[in-house]
Image (cartoon, rainbow, N blue to C red):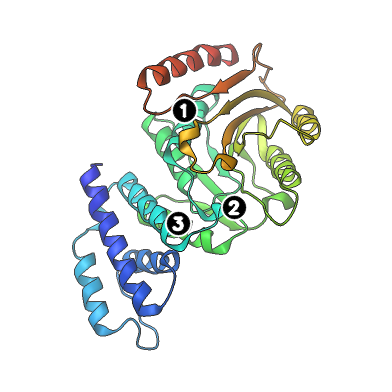
Amino acid sequence: MTQDKVETLYKVLDQASQLLIDELDTAYFDALIEVTQDLLSGTIQVEDGKPSQAVVKRLQQLFAGVMISSLESETIRKAIGLALLRAAKIDKLQANHQLTPDMIGLIIGYLLNKLNKKPINRLFDVTVGTGNLLGAVNAFLRQQNKQPQELYGMDIDDTLLAMAGISFDLQQIPVNLFNDDATQGNLPTADAVISDLPLVHNQKSDQVDQNLISASIDAVVEGGFAIYVVPSNLLEGNQAKDMLRLITAKTYLQGFLKLPDSVFKNSNAQKAVLILQKQGGLAQQAKEVLIGQLPALKDTYALKSFFNDLDEWAKQLN
């Protein structure tokens, strides 16, 4: 993968989406879904005479500039990620419709690689959204020669799920996607679970967080890890007692790492990585729970030191 190829594909996606925004009078996100579907099928869908023949010709010219089948999966994922960032800005998407940053995927992938004693045959994102977190973690594990054999994703939002499905299809990565509410249970069993917990505005967010964590913990095999991106105040305030009771009933709380402030534009949206291990099997409580804050990405020395410390800490679980 080269950054030039990522930029080239992104520009095609962006320009094609802009054409459809004007032609179909639609949002950027919806136009992007249409564009990626056209790329996947190799044909440009026309309904009721739209897009016009002139726009179809322009789209064909744009698509001719990329040979999607020859691109690496990471090139495609990163280009779609850039387009989704563009959609978030233009459409002013709510937080739940925005992709999880690659840096968070890197951290979760790193943790799973270091902590899991057994192969992760099944990796399950219970709030998969547009699929960027699941794709980023899968890519990291693949680089470590530990690629999961099966990927699973669930989301209650069918529009986000459609984008995830098209993205994985373009990357030629098989995935099992379910349009359902993970809090309702009946989840497929997995060796590891991940999730970027959604922000909830129409009901008590702490209760939704508890329901999601409880249901997804049940889906993890004994000794397996569940790693969540959560509000940084999850274990503070009035909800902390109930959350800790839920966590410690079925899992070992192994770590809680606050993410760098620079990752989030809104100070109210600060998040952390919650590391849980399902009780049973060879699982054991770490002698020292990993608690801290990741340094800023720009501070390469501090980052290196942090990951060295993380490696040492992980040895007690292996």
Q: Position of residue 100 (x, y in %)?
A: 49, 44
Q: SS class of the residue under badge 3?
A: helix
Q: Residues within 10 Å of mark 3 (few under 14, many from 20)?
A: some
Quadrant occupied by the N terminus? top left
Q: Position of residue 27 (x, y in %)?
A: 44, 69
Which quadrant of the view contains residue 17?
A: bottom left
Which numbered disc flags the more N-terminal residue, 1 or 2? 1
What residue is pinned by disc 3?
88
In front: label 3 or label 2: 3
- Identify which residue is drawn at 68% across, 42% down: 216
What residue is pinned by disc 2?
154
Which numbered disc flags the more N-terminal residue, 3 or 1? 3
Mark 1 and mark 2 residues within 8 Å of each other at the beta carbon: no
> Quick check: can you spot residue 216?
yes
- Identify which residue is drawn at 23% across, 54% down: 8
Alpha carbon distance from label 3 to label 2: 21 Å
User: Which amino acid, mark 1?
Assistant: Tyr
Alpha carbon distance from label 3 to label 1: 27 Å
Q: Is residue 243 above or below residue 34?
A: above
- Identify which residue is drawn at 68% across, 24% down: 253
95 vs 212, nearest the viewer: 95
User: Which amino acid, mark 3?
Assistant: Ala
Alpha carbon distance from label 1 to label 2: 22 Å
- Identify which residue is drawn at 71% across, 30% down: 235
